[in-house]
Image (spheres, rainbow, N blue to C red):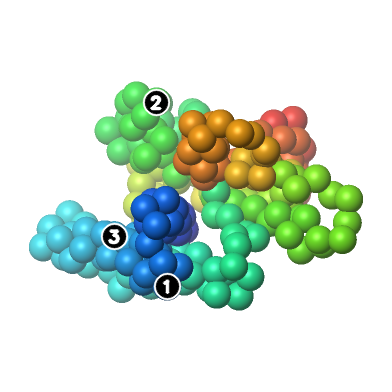
Amino acid sequence: MDKIGHVFSAYQIGKQGAHLLNWSGVSKQNQLIYGATLGFGFLTAVEVLDGYSSEWGFSWGDVGANALGTGLYISQELLWKEQRIDVKFSFRQTRYAELRPDKLGASFFEQVLKDYNGQTYWLSFNLHAFFKESNIPKWLNLALGYGGEGMLSGIEVTDNQLLTSNRRYRQYYISLDVNLSKIRTNSALLKSVFSVFNMIKIPFPSLEINKNGAVFHLFH
């Protein structure tokens, strides 16, 4: 989950950096060079600092994930001159944080950052962008999600260590989503708000597939 979080962060920071330079009148080429790479540069600098920490340490895997997130944004701009696939995030509170509030967060905002069990990362595909001659609404997306369950620490532990019988497993989701940037409005303020909050996956009915089978969620 940590690596996917790096992909998401690098993509979104780069996307907002490019949008900011576009708003400032910077050329498209420089938007991609200086704006879209902002996420990679910032997160990799943090990774270098982590290398001096006894608790965290440097990770080439994290650097690779940063590059993947940045590359996903830049490649779409070069290929399609638009973002047809967005990397998005959603969160739900879980019971695991109560077991380890020191590691998974005591408050809601801490849990959003620390509790991987409640995090889901999505690839959100804009359907109209791929089928431009269709009558599909321009704001409608198909979202494929990835999450995990049973994570109480950085390593897998035995039952008696954390008083839980849960085992880690992966979760895969399919759902619908809304591309807020495709909603028409004449308000510059709303356009800015939609641009920022478009990183959040809008709740819709979803189908989860995991090692135990399939589960339907009314909203995810």
Single out the mark in the foreground, 2 or 1: 1
77 or 53: nearer the eye?
77
The CA distance from mark 2 to mark 1 is 40 Å
For the residues labelled 3 and 2, the Cα–Cα distance comes to 24 Å
* Quadrant hosting residue 65: bottom left
Assess whether mark 2 and mark 3 are in contact (beta carbons under 8 angstroms).
Answer: no
Q: Position of residue 10 (x, y in %)?
A: 39, 59
Local SS, label 3: helix
- The x, y position of residue 22, in whole percent, is 43, 56
Q: Residue at x 45, y 44 (%)?
A: 116
The x and y percentages for residue 73 are 50, 65
Q: Amino acid at mark 2?
A: Phe
The reply, left or right, for residue 58 in relation to residue 39 is left
Q: Is residue 57 visible?
A: no
Image depth: mark 3 or mark 2 in front: 3
Residue located at (55% from left, 75% from top)? 78
Amino acid carrying mark 3 in the image: Leu
State if disc 3 and disc 1 touch (CB < 8 Å). Answer: no
Residue pointed to by mark 3: 43
Q: Give the number of the disc on residue 108.
A: 2
Give the residue drawn at x 67%, y 39%: 183
Give 125 or 173, whichever is nearer the viewer. 125
For the residues labelled 2 and 1, say whether their Cβ atoms are less than 8 Å apart. no
In the image, is residue 98 above or below residue 185? above
Q: Residues within 10 Å of mark 1 (few under 14, many from 20)?
A: few
Element type where label 2 sits in the image: helix
Q: Secondary structure at mark 1?
A: helix
Q: Which mark is residue 29?
A: 1
Please report whichever mark, 2 or 1, sits nearer to the chain's N-terminal start: 1
Q: x, y (%) of residue 101?
A: 33, 30
Among the two numbered marks 1 and 3 on one chain, the one whose residue lies closer to the N terminus: 1
